[in-house]
Image (tube, rainbow, N blue to C red):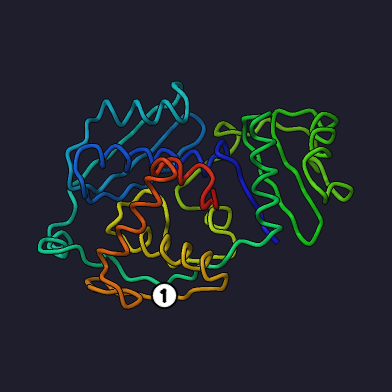
Amino acid sequence: MFEKVNPSHPDKVADRIAGALVDYAYTLEANPKIAVEILLGHGDCKIIIETSVLLDSKKITEIAHRIAGKDITVDCLVVPQDIELAKNQEEEIRCGDNGIFRGVPFTAEQIQLNNLAKSIYKKWPSDGKYLIDHGKLVICQSNAKNKDLLKFTKKCGNSIESAVINPLGEWTGGTNVDCGATNRKLGSDMADSCTGGGLHGKDLSKADVSVNIYAWLKAQELKRPVELSCAIGDKTVDGKPYSFIVEIAREYIQKIGGFEKLAEWGYQLK
């Protein structure tokens, strides 16, 4: 059982803006400290950023307009990272938060839905969500004629005979229909993996990012669930230096093209 949303879902738009702002911070410093929260919808985009680096307000607005559209009004609050929290990282990279994490290998069904969602989105690049449950397939794709969507979907997989297409009828979708918020679609991003915190809008010092990625990657390699926990200030996780965990996550982020790319589709095997 798995639900996937595409990059134009309002929650994913929020995640993508948050990810792009983290990418921006990494162009300014090698190891910035940043946390971004976003709420958007109906023409408005509210952004709150806690950061150790100086961000240009014009650049922030440009990023939001590129992803969410130039018609939105951007309201952004940028504040310095808390001084006491910053001291945690002064001498060396240490765990930036408390957390519990469970990485789980992708199933064949989850991989199938991932691939189907990408195929549909390539043809109809607008708000959409997709669900599969033991062969039952539900496709909700905005701005697509049902007959065209059914015809296209039949070419893309094996669970097609039971497919339900837009059960409430054709729809428009997008941020003028629904609101979006960061880290509200972690089930879509992580499948059966789970976390005590959010994956998006944070730098690599945060366990919510680095330990999450590390646990997921290890689960794919071992082909079994991996459970980890950590506390703020920890120097080691899973018997390894926290700096090692951070570098594993950094390598994965760089490989997929950045934090914004992570936000588009969540974890991906390729």
Given residues 171 and 162, the one toward you in this image is 162
Residue drawn at x 12%, y 58% is 83
Q: Residue at x 30, y 50 (%)?
A: 35
Residue 8 is left or right of residue 166, and the answer is left
**Left or right: 46, with 268 as reference point:** left
Q: Which residue is mark 1?
A: 228
Could you tell me residue 82's position as x and y percent?
17, 56
Above or below, comparing residue 103 to residue 109 in the picture: below
Up-down: is 235 above or below 48?
below
- Which quarter of the figure is the N terminus placed in? bottom right
**Which residue is depicted at the point 64% across and 48% down?**
114
Badge 1 crowding class, 10 Å Cα cut-off, few under 14, some 14 to 19, many 20 or more, is some
In the displayed structure image, the side of residue 121 where residue 220 appears, left or right: left
Quadrant assignment, res 77:
top left
Q: Nearer the viewer, residue 243 or 117?
A: 243
- Secondary structure found at label 1: strand
Furthest residue to the bottom?
Answer: 239
Name the residue type under label 1: Leu
Query: Which residue, as the protein is rendered here, is positioned at the far front?
Result: 221
The total number of labels drawn is: 1
Q: Residue 127 location, x and y as percent? A: 62, 36
Position of 48 with respect to 224 (left or right) is: left
Farthest right residue in view: 161
Q: Residue furthest top?
A: 70
Write the residue at 51% across / 66% down.
Answer: 221
Residue 160 appears at what percent x and percent y?
A: 84, 46
Residue 120 x %, y %: 69, 36
